[in-house]
Amino acid sequence: MAVYRPPHIPSSEITPKDVWLNRRSILKSAAALGATTLAGPLAACGQEAATTTSYTTDEPVTPYQDVTGYNNFYEFGLQKTDPARHSGDFNPRPWTIEVDGLVNNPRTFDIDDLIASQTIEERIYRMRCVEAWSMVIPWNGFPLSALLNQVEPLSSAKYVAFETVVRPEEMPGQRGFFQPLPWPYREGLRLDEAMHPLTILSTGVFGETLPNQNGAPVRLVVPWKYGFKGIKSIVKITLTEQEPPSTWNVSAPSEYGFYANVNPNVPHPRWSQATERRIGTGGFFGADRRETLMFNGYADEVADMYADMDLTRYF
């Protein structure tokens, strides 16, 4: 079967949200004013001034209402619509991220100071959920390596562990006697994965500040891995020598591996990963179905990191 190749669509025709279109128009017409002059009005509108990059795709961007309304964020509930419906009381400011472990310079970063110190970039990435659906999302953010370089990892550091926030008073999915997952939500990457240029910390989407339901104020985005690796609302990052626990791997190790690389040749025990539903594309069930690409289409950039690994074992 031939691999699906989307037609070439100019970026001016794939933007589904007026705010994003307006932001691009403003950036173009006001370029002569300089980034400092432009950043103020955008910030006041809840938008992030971001530089465009070569990290993009010709595939149509998923509509804004789907990116922000169809989410897995169990801290707010089990249904896809729960995060948007139940995250209104969540307060992502003030916010700090503690970075410790095997580093020369452990630090606690204020999120706004951290954002101000970085060049925020727009990255349009494919996102493939382990549940066999996918989106194309325009993230704003900066490379995770930019943060890790500030804390100076020791030579003994091999992995990077992440934790999300625990606030049951603001996150209804964390309340009650029966919980679907152990909190805090935890994730991890190998250090070379964390330092890879594709790996970012996202602080926005569609040129706007990251909504609560998408992981405000900061989340991990690793586009060649299944979406559950993209831990949201991060409060702690720890560099370690040993592979850290990750929530889904601990909860169901036969179904969710630590690496979670997108691999159409390794089925989930309960469904095939060979194809995916692209959310927001129409079709009889509201999404078309297409073949899943190895490493979610990023094989040229990342496959060499796994050249000597059995990906059916290290899934």
Image: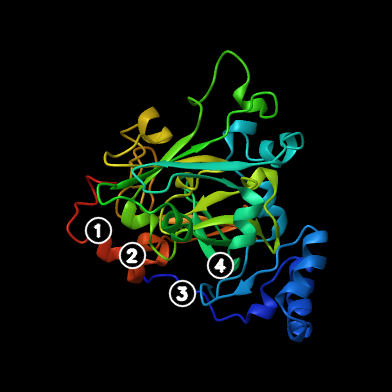
Q: Position of residue 248 (x, y in %)?
A: 41, 34
Q: Is residue 86 above or below residue 276?
A: above
Q: CA distance from mark 1 to mark 3?
A: 25 Å
Q: CA distance from mark 1 to mark 2?
A: 8 Å
Residue 37 appears left or right of 242: right
Q: Residues within 10 Å of mark 4 (few under 14, many from 20)?
A: many
Q: CA distance from mark 2 to mark 4?
A: 17 Å
Checking the image for residue 123, the label placed there is 4
Q: Is residue 313 above or below residue 121?
A: above
Residue 286 appears left or right of 303: right
Checking the image for residue 302, the label placed there is 2
Checking the image for residue 315, the label placed there is none
**Mark 4: which secondary structure?**
strand
**Mark 1: which secondary structure?**
helix
Q: Residues within 10 Å of mark 1 (few under 14, many from 20)?
A: few
Labels 1, 3: front one: 1
